Amino acid sequence: MTPERSIPGYKLLHLLGRGHTALVHLAQDAQGRQVALKVPLEETLRDKEAAERFGNEVRLTLQFRHPHVVQGYAGTAFGPKAFVALRHYPAGTLSDVLAGRGGQKLPLEEALRILADVAAGLTYLHGLSAVHQDVKTQNVYVDDLGRAALGDLGSTYFITQGGQSSGSPYYMAPEIYHGESSSPASDVYSLGVLAYELLTGQRPHLGDTYEALMAAHLNSFATPLSHLNPQVPRPVARLAERALAKRPQDRPTAGDLRRALLAALGEPDEEASPQEMSPTPPAVPARQMGRHGPAAPRLPAAVAPAEAPPTAERNGSRWNPFKRRK
Ligand SMILES: Nc1ncnc2c1ncn2[C@@H]1O[C@H](COP(=O)(O)OP(=O)(O)OP(=O)(O)O)[C@@H](O)[C@H]1O
């Protein structure tokens, strides 16, 4: 299978995966570097909301700079030539890694390592006042050393600009089911679900329908993580359980989780501040946008990673947050 459009400057090697909106190929760029080349499907380009979401992903992926956020090398956000060249993660998604283990839990250290990396990526985004909104195994990418990065930034937005709340039902915080705004705390809830899944081998809440999952996230309390896996270091288990608190204000921060995970791994806490990590820290516009508006465009349609942050624009369309969530 090849993309419906070829992208000048890239030689396709083989298909890595097909999402609902894009084909992703391993490709070689003009410098001979292997990249994951993500090209939207024609139907994505024809659908205004899907095209906006892809454009948002391209802009933000090129703007953010952190070892645990998927890196973008080059891209075009909008129009018939839209694409993004991403760092290639040879192990694919965390979901692929788990499937490859035949349903077995990851060894404890490997799980703690991945969670520490995801918590670090999320801490970076929250430090820039951005919310990811879709933390889940399908959106975590793993390299050949078992290090992880948070990807798929299509739903990510800057809190100060507003954006449309969304999420994936298995990972979505109670307040998002209630129709409230996303926040760092709702990302932490999703991280709590991911931690529970990796450390116990099962999700905290199950359900065959959206309504059943909503009822479970709103009203049920999962079996404590520490009961299902007593090997998990206590501070990590305690914070991961608190991450699943029903009230956002009762949850720890992503930074709290990251520190506990690093301590459990016996690693020093050497994270630089977001400003040190990002050569182009995003400007925060004074104007507030409606919380249900789509994420505002931040970079011009064709962007290079080092370009200056753009101004925000409003676009009033909505998309159904659950339309293509796994
Ligand atoms: N950087 C990468 N490195 C390795 N494989 C990748 C990378 N990016 C994407 N893939 C592969 O391509 C698949 C599809 O990519 P992705 O999930 O980003 O597409 P999408 O259309 O945005 O997804 P969705 O279905 O969530 O809308 C992934 O599941 C993964 O297998």
Image (cartoon, helix red, strand yellow):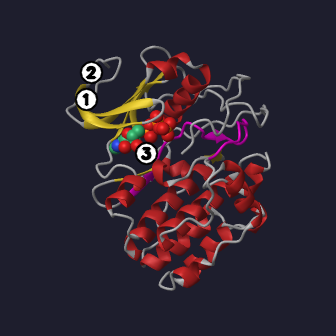
Residue 49 in the image: x percent, y percent?
A: 61, 24
Of mark 1 and mark 2, the one earlier in the sequence is 2
Residue at point 77% right, 32% down?
Answer: 289
Which residue is disc 1 drawn over? 29
* Chief secondary structure of the magenta portion: loop
The residue tagged with tag 1: helix, strand or loop? Answer: loop
The residue tagged with tag 3: helix, strand or loop? Answer: loop
Which residue is disc 2 drawn over? 9
The residue tagged with tag 2: helix, strand or loop? Answer: loop
Q: Nearer the viewer, residue 138 or 243?
A: 138
What is the distance, in whole Å, between disc 1 and disc 2 at their CAs? 6 Å
Q: Does residue 306 appear left or right of residue 251 in this picture?
A: left
Question: Which of the numbered marks, if any, corresponds to residue 70?
Answer: 3
Residue that sits furthest to the top in the current view: 80
Q: Which of 208 and 286 is in front in this view?
A: 208
Amino acid identity at mark 3? Val
What is the distance, in whole Å, between disc 3 and disc 2 at their CAs? 21 Å
